[in-house]
Amino acid sequence: MKHTIIITAGGIGKRMGGEIPKQFLLLAGKPVLMHTIERFYQFDNQAQIILTLPNEWKDYWEELCDNLDFSISHEIIDGGKERFHSIQNALQIAHGELIGVHDGVRPLVSISTIEKCFHTAKAKGNAIPVLEVKESLRKLENNHSTALVRSEYRLVQTPQVFKSDVLKKAYKQSFHSAITDDASLVESLGIQINLVEGNDGNIKITTPVDLQLAELLLKSENN
Protein backbone atom coordinates (compact mmCIF):
# COMPACT_ATOMS: atom_id res chain seq x y z
CA MET A 1 0.00 0.00 0.00
CA LYS A 2 1.46 3.34 -1.08
CA HIS A 3 2.16 5.83 1.72
CA THR A 4 2.22 9.62 1.62
CA ILE A 5 3.76 11.59 4.48
CA ILE A 6 2.84 15.28 4.81
CA ILE A 7 5.32 17.02 7.10
CA THR A 8 4.12 20.42 8.22
CA ALA A 9 6.88 22.96 8.75
CA GLY A 10 5.11 26.25 8.16
CA GLY A 11 5.72 27.82 11.57
CA ILE A 12 8.05 30.72 12.25
CA GLY A 13 8.85 29.70 15.83
CA LYS A 14 7.99 32.83 17.81
CA ARG A 15 8.23 30.97 21.12
CA MET A 16 11.84 30.09 20.38
CA GLY A 17 12.71 33.76 20.53
CA GLY A 18 15.17 33.68 17.61
CA GLU A 19 15.23 34.72 13.97
CA ILE A 20 15.50 31.18 12.57
CA PRO A 21 12.28 29.09 12.53
CA LYS A 22 12.47 26.18 14.96
CA GLN A 23 12.36 23.53 12.22
CA PHE A 24 15.74 24.75 10.95
CA LEU A 25 17.52 24.87 14.32
CA LEU A 26 20.37 22.42 14.76
CA LEU A 27 19.84 19.21 16.69
CA ALA A 28 22.99 17.12 17.00
CA GLY A 29 24.51 19.01 14.09
CA LYS A 30 21.54 18.77 11.70
CA PRO A 31 18.36 20.80 11.32
CA VAL A 32 15.42 19.41 13.28
CA LEU A 33 13.49 18.95 10.04
CA MET A 34 16.10 16.62 8.57
CA HIS A 35 15.86 14.33 11.58
CA THR A 36 12.07 14.24 11.12
CA ILE A 37 12.26 13.34 7.43
CA GLU A 38 14.84 10.64 8.15
CA ARG A 39 12.46 8.90 10.59
CA PHE A 40 9.82 8.42 7.91
CA TYR A 41 12.39 7.41 5.31
CA GLN A 42 13.55 4.69 7.72
CA PHE A 43 9.93 3.53 8.01
CA ASP A 44 9.32 3.47 4.25
CA ASN A 45 12.01 4.56 1.80
CA GLN A 46 9.47 4.47 -1.03
CA ALA A 47 6.95 6.80 0.62
CA GLN A 48 5.97 10.08 -1.00
CA ILE A 49 7.21 12.80 1.35
CA ILE A 50 5.62 16.24 1.04
CA LEU A 51 7.05 19.14 3.00
CA THR A 52 5.03 22.32 3.61
CA LEU A 53 7.27 25.36 4.03
CA PRO A 54 6.78 29.13 4.19
CA ASN A 55 7.57 30.42 0.72
CA GLU A 56 10.18 32.85 2.05
CA TRP A 57 12.18 30.01 3.64
CA LYS A 58 12.30 27.61 0.67
CA ASP A 59 15.65 28.85 -0.62
CA TYR A 60 17.13 28.62 2.87
CA TRP A 61 15.99 25.00 3.19
CA GLU A 62 17.34 24.07 -0.22
CA GLU A 63 20.66 25.65 0.69
CA LEU A 64 20.76 23.59 3.90
CA CYS A 65 20.10 20.43 1.90
CA ASP A 66 22.93 21.25 -0.51
CA ASN A 67 25.41 22.13 2.24
CA LEU A 68 24.66 18.99 4.26
CA ASP A 69 24.29 16.64 1.27
CA PHE A 70 20.74 15.79 2.33
CA SER A 71 19.43 13.65 -0.50
CA ILE A 72 16.19 12.05 0.73
CA SER A 73 13.65 12.76 -1.99
CA HIS A 74 10.78 15.07 -1.02
CA GLU A 75 8.40 17.54 -2.60
CA ILE A 76 7.94 21.09 -1.30
CA ILE A 77 4.56 22.82 -1.14
CA ASP A 78 3.80 26.39 -0.05
CA GLY A 79 2.61 26.63 3.52
CA GLY A 80 -0.75 28.41 3.80
CA LYS A 81 -2.01 31.04 6.19
CA GLU A 82 -2.95 28.31 8.69
CA ARG A 83 -1.80 24.71 9.10
CA PHE A 84 -5.20 23.73 7.65
CA HIS A 85 -4.44 25.52 4.39
CA SER A 86 -0.92 24.04 4.20
CA ILE A 87 -2.34 20.53 4.37
CA GLN A 88 -5.02 21.40 1.83
CA ASN A 89 -2.24 22.45 -0.53
CA ALA A 90 -0.28 19.26 0.09
CA LEU A 91 -3.32 17.05 -0.48
CA GLN A 92 -3.52 18.34 -4.04
CA ILE A 93 -0.45 16.28 -4.94
CA ALA A 94 -0.75 13.45 -2.38
CA HIS A 95 -1.18 10.09 -4.12
CA GLY A 96 -0.75 7.56 -1.32
CA GLU A 97 -3.58 5.24 -0.28
CA LEU A 98 -2.72 6.07 3.32
CA ILE A 99 -1.73 9.62 4.24
CA GLY A 100 0.10 10.52 7.44
CA VAL A 101 0.33 14.10 8.68
CA HIS A 102 3.22 14.89 11.02
CA ASP A 103 4.60 17.96 12.78
CA GLY A 104 8.00 18.84 11.36
CA VAL A 105 9.23 19.70 14.84
CA ARG A 106 8.60 16.21 16.24
CA PRO A 107 11.93 14.68 15.16
CA LEU A 108 12.01 11.83 17.69
CA VAL A 109 8.87 9.92 16.77
CA SER A 110 9.77 6.25 17.01
CA ILE A 111 9.59 3.86 14.08
CA SER A 112 7.36 1.71 16.27
CA THR A 113 4.86 4.56 16.69
CA ILE A 114 4.84 5.22 12.93
CA GLU A 115 4.29 1.51 12.20
CA LYS A 116 1.41 1.24 14.66
CA CYS A 117 -0.30 4.28 13.16
CA PHE A 118 -0.05 3.06 9.57
CA HIS A 119 -0.92 -0.57 10.35
CA THR A 120 -4.00 0.43 12.36
CA ALA A 121 -5.08 2.95 9.70
CA LYS A 122 -4.78 0.25 7.04
CA ALA A 123 -7.03 -2.06 9.06
CA LYS A 124 -9.49 0.45 10.52
CA GLY A 125 -9.30 3.57 8.34
CA ASN A 126 -7.38 5.89 10.66
CA ALA A 127 -5.12 6.07 13.69
CA ILE A 128 -3.52 8.69 15.92
CA PRO A 129 -0.85 8.21 18.61
CA VAL A 130 -1.65 9.24 22.17
CA LEU A 131 -0.12 9.12 25.64
CA GLU A 132 -1.71 8.79 29.05
CA VAL A 133 -1.74 11.97 31.14
CA LYS A 134 0.79 11.56 33.94
CA GLU A 135 0.12 14.78 35.84
CA SER A 136 -2.97 16.07 37.61
CA LEU A 137 -5.36 18.24 35.61
CA ARG A 138 -7.57 21.12 36.66
CA LYS A 139 -10.22 22.94 34.63
CA LEU A 140 -10.41 26.72 34.93
CA GLU A 141 -13.88 28.26 34.73
CA ASN A 142 -15.21 31.58 36.04
CA ASN A 143 -12.09 32.18 38.17
CA HIS A 144 -12.43 28.77 39.82
CA SER A 145 -10.63 25.48 39.19
CA THR A 146 -11.97 21.94 39.33
CA ALA A 147 -10.00 18.70 39.42
CA LEU A 148 -10.42 16.42 36.42
CA VAL A 149 -10.08 12.65 36.22
CA ARG A 150 -6.85 12.30 34.24
CA SER A 151 -7.57 8.69 33.23
CA GLU A 152 -10.34 10.05 31.01
CA TYR A 153 -7.89 12.15 28.94
CA ARG A 154 -5.07 11.50 26.49
CA LEU A 155 -2.28 13.66 25.05
CA VAL A 156 -2.39 13.64 21.25
CA GLN A 157 0.71 13.34 19.05
CA THR A 158 1.45 12.88 15.36
CA PRO A 159 1.63 11.27 12.82
CA GLN A 160 -2.11 11.15 12.34
CA VAL A 161 -2.84 8.65 9.59
CA PHE A 162 -5.96 8.27 7.44
CA LYS A 163 -7.15 6.57 4.30
CA SER A 164 -6.70 9.04 1.48
CA ASP A 165 -10.32 9.49 0.48
CA VAL A 166 -11.40 10.22 4.06
CA LEU A 167 -8.74 12.84 4.71
CA LYS A 168 -9.31 14.56 1.38
CA LYS A 169 -13.06 14.68 2.05
CA ALA A 170 -12.44 16.15 5.51
CA TYR A 171 -10.28 18.92 4.05
CA LYS A 172 -13.04 20.00 1.67
CA GLN A 173 -14.74 21.55 4.69
CA SER A 174 -14.35 25.25 5.38
CA PHE A 175 -11.73 26.36 7.86
CA HIS A 176 -12.87 27.37 11.34
CA SER A 177 -11.03 28.06 14.58
CA ALA A 178 -12.38 24.95 16.33
CA ILE A 179 -10.19 22.72 14.13
CA THR A 180 -7.34 21.61 16.38
CA ASP A 181 -5.87 18.76 14.34
CA ASP A 182 -6.57 16.37 11.47
CA ALA A 183 -8.40 13.92 13.72
CA SER A 184 -10.90 16.52 14.91
CA LEU A 185 -11.61 17.45 11.29
CA VAL A 186 -12.18 13.82 10.28
CA GLU A 187 -14.24 13.24 13.42
CA SER A 188 -16.57 16.05 12.36
CA LEU A 189 -17.61 13.79 9.46
CA GLY A 190 -19.02 11.35 12.03
CA ILE A 191 -16.03 8.98 11.82
CA GLN A 192 -14.65 7.37 14.97
CA ILE A 193 -10.95 7.94 15.60
CA ASN A 194 -8.73 5.00 16.58
CA LEU A 195 -6.06 5.51 19.23
CA VAL A 196 -2.67 3.80 19.38
CA GLU A 197 0.11 4.19 21.93
CA GLY A 198 2.62 6.93 21.11
CA ASN A 199 6.15 7.30 22.48
CA ASP A 200 7.34 9.60 25.25
CA GLY A 201 10.22 10.93 23.18
CA ASN A 202 7.87 12.19 20.47
CA ILE A 203 7.93 15.73 21.86
CA LYS A 204 7.02 18.84 19.89
CA ILE A 205 9.92 21.29 19.90
CA THR A 206 8.49 24.74 20.59
CA THR A 207 10.79 26.24 23.24
CA PRO A 208 14.56 26.26 23.93
CA VAL A 209 14.01 23.77 26.77
CA ASP A 210 12.36 21.36 24.32
CA LEU A 211 15.41 21.56 22.07
CA GLN A 212 17.72 20.78 25.00
CA LEU A 213 15.54 17.82 25.96
CA ALA A 214 15.57 16.55 22.38
CA GLU A 215 19.38 16.66 22.41
CA LEU A 216 19.43 14.47 25.52
CA LEU A 217 16.85 12.05 24.13
CA LEU A 218 18.70 11.70 20.84
CA LYS A 219 21.98 11.11 22.63
CA SER A 220 20.29 8.44 24.74
CA GLU A 221 18.89 6.76 21.61
CA ASN A 222 22.31 6.69 19.95
CA ASN A 223 23.89 5.14 23.04
Image (cartoon, helix red, strand yellow):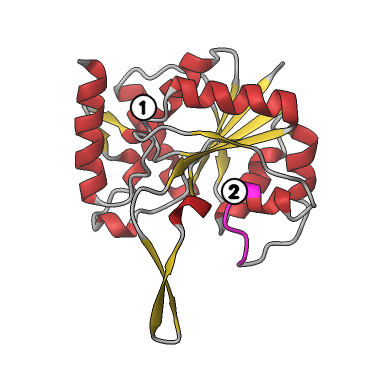
The image quadrant that residue 217 belongs to is top left
Q: Nearer the viewer, residue 206 or 125?
A: 125
> Residue reaching furthest bottom?
142
The image quadrant that residue 195 belongs to is top right
N-term-proximal mark, 2 vs 1:
1
Comparing labels 2 and 1, the label whose residue is closer to the camera: 1
Magenta span contains residue 179: yes
Q: Nearer the viewer, residue 177 or 110?
A: 110
Query: Can the viewer see residue 193 in this picture?
Result: yes
| Residue 82 placement (x, y as % from top left) | 56, 58
Q: Is residue 77 left or right of residue 26?
A: right
Q: Residue at x 61, y 33 (%)?
A: 100
| Residue 114 placement (x, y as % from top left) | 52, 25
* Picture quarter with the N terminus: top right
Q: Is residue 136 left or right of residue 74?
A: left
89 shown above or below 174: above
Question: Mark 1: which amino acid?
Answer: His
Q: Residue at x 48, y 42 (%)?
A: 157
Q: Nearer the viewer, residue 52 or 146?
A: 146
Q: Is residue 145 left or right of residue 170?
A: left
Q: Nearer the viewer, residue 119 or 143?
A: 143
SS of the residue at dot 2?
Answer: helix
Q: Which residue matches tag 2?
A: 86
In space, the residues marked 2 and 1 are separated at their CA atoms by: 21 Å
Q: Which residue matches tag 1?
A: 35
Q: Residues in magenta?
A: 178-183
Magenta span contains residue 97: no
44 shown above or below 61: above
| Residue 3 placement (x, y as % from top left) | 65, 22
Instruction: Check disc 2: other Cα within 10 Å, few if <14, some if 14-19, many if 20+.
Output: many
Q: How many marks?
A: 2
SS of the residue at dot 1?
Answer: helix
